[in-house]
Amino acid sequence: MKKYIGLIVSILVLVLFIGGSYIIYNSRGDNSTTINNEENEGKESNESGETAEDSGGELAEDFNLMSNDNKMYKLSDFRGKIVVLNFWATWCGPCKSEIPDFQKAHEKFEKDGDVVILAINLTDGARETKSDVIDFVESNNLTMKVLFDEKTEVATKYGINNIPTTYVLNKEGKIYKKKTGMITYDELISIVSEL
């Protein structure tokens, strides 16, 4: 009888462990995808996905990236405009879900002329190729600037471990907000309107 009690207790502990793991996993939300096995050390996220450690107006690191229209873009060329940087990939479900909102925002911002969206694709050549991205851009009629981060150097500079991740930079090129996870059209418009 003691043998069965021990077995029952072991099964209960295993069930509780699996159930607890499931609850913890689901509480993280399904609005971002980890791009590697490293966790974002030292940065905890709140429920909305915004990092708890904001840069406090730190100047965004400059970069040069080629776009899907074969032009080279330098971040510092957009000084004087609000810049939205969105790190994404076509294999990332949450990224694909938010792309229509970014396109809609791009169309609104393009009319105003004060805001530019740079969709920075993690084009590593393995999980994501230029042809994957170009096919996606064409099939979704995207007109916003899509930049290829072919060596993921820019993603590394910006500490991107999960995608989608969005940065909003003020007109001086300083980081105003960072959000890890999906962002909606209304959220993006609201953040930009604060500037």
Image: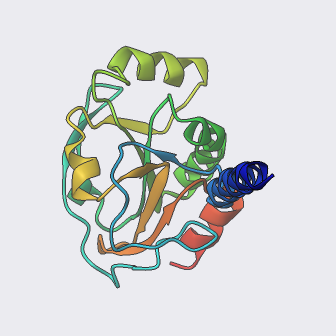
x and y, in percent, of residue 125 in the image: 28, 22
Q: Quadrant of residue 185?
A: bottom right
Position in image of residue 50 (x %, y %): 52, 70
12 in relation to 148, above or below: below
In the image, taking residue 14 as reference, residue 153 lies left or right, namely left
Q: Nearer the viewer, residue 19 or 88?
A: 19
| Residue found at the very far front of the displayed protein | 1
Residue 11 spot, x, y in % from top left: 72, 49
Farthest residue, direction right: 1
Residue positioned 35% across, 26% down in the render: 68
* Residue found at x 28% / y 29%: 124
Residue at position x 38%, y 65% in the image: 81
Q: Tell which of 117 and 162 is nearer to you.
A: 162
Q: Is residue 40 above or below residue 136?
A: below
Q: Is residue 101 above or below residue 60?
A: above
Q: Position of residue 130 (x, y in %)?
A: 34, 20
